[in-house]
Amino acid sequence: MQTRRETIQQSMVVAGLLATAGFPQFAHAAFNKVGFDAKSVQDAVKAYGGGSISESKDVTITGPDIAENGAVVPLGASTALTGVKHMLVLVEKNPSALVAMFHVSDAVDANFLTRAKMGQSSDVYAVAIMADGKALFAKKEVKVTLGGCGG
Amino acid sequence: MADPMRIRAQAAGDKATIRVLMSHEMESGQRKDAAGKTVPAWFIQEVTATHNGKPVLSAEWVPAVSKNPFLQFAVKGAKAGDKIAVTWKDNKGDTRTDEATVS
């Protein structure tokens, strides 16, 4: 038999869960939208709170020089710096430049590898947004051959 | 419900490298079908990872990530026997969580 007090406590817990689960998602959705709509590298960086971007040797982007298949281009973004807040992977000439955004916590290395789609040959960027708002990037040109014959 | 993810977690030194292969269409919203209608975008929006239940990573993705996405990252302080769970959520609200043990 459940007392009234227990019922109220339970509903409070549920309400609390809903609140914590619900609100960040809305915040995320809004965030995602801004980054997603960003057409250029700089706009995408701004959407995640970064200032003007500057090139840095401490950030590395890995990717193939020539991608035979633009639908699957392995791209890696890494940095050895500490105090990184977000790590962004961008393809400059895609309809929306941003590919992936990672929230970096203390528990993970700022070193991510994923695969991206590329519509055409373009510069790809790895951007590290530091806790102080500085945005450091590395870029690399990736050529996409549509023929898929390895040429 | 979508197909299971394939997760491999390997400890090396004081960290573990996690490799995840998700099974998802990742439709870009740019393609058109035979009738000339745009195929609506369908993609993984949010990826989160936990280490022994503690959130360690969250990521936001857009359709520019490849079909059947691959993700590699490293968790500091993870050792053999630890549990790594990865969750994704797509823009249709579908979600999937899979767990792996660090070896």
Image (spheres, helix red, strand yellow):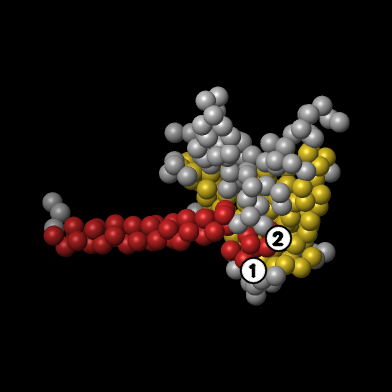
For this view, does B98 lie left or right of residue B15? Answer: left
| Residue occupying image coordinates x 82% and y 64% | A57
Q: Are marks 1 and 2 in contact (CB under 8 Å)?
A: yes
Residue A71 position by quadrant: top right
Chain for mark 2? Answer: A
Residue A43 screen position, x and y as percent: 63, 62
Report the amino acid beneath label 2: Val
The foreground one among B78 and A14 is A14
Q: Is residue B83 visible?
A: no
Mark 1 nearby-residue class (10 Å; few <14, some 14–19, many ≥20)? many
The foreground one among A66 and B81 is A66
Q: Quadrant of the C terminus of chain A?
A: top right
Q: Is residue B3 above or below residue A131?
A: above
Q: Is residue A30 visible?
A: yes
Mark 2 nearby-residue class (10 Å; few <14, some 14–19, many ≥20)? many
Residue that label 2 marks: A127
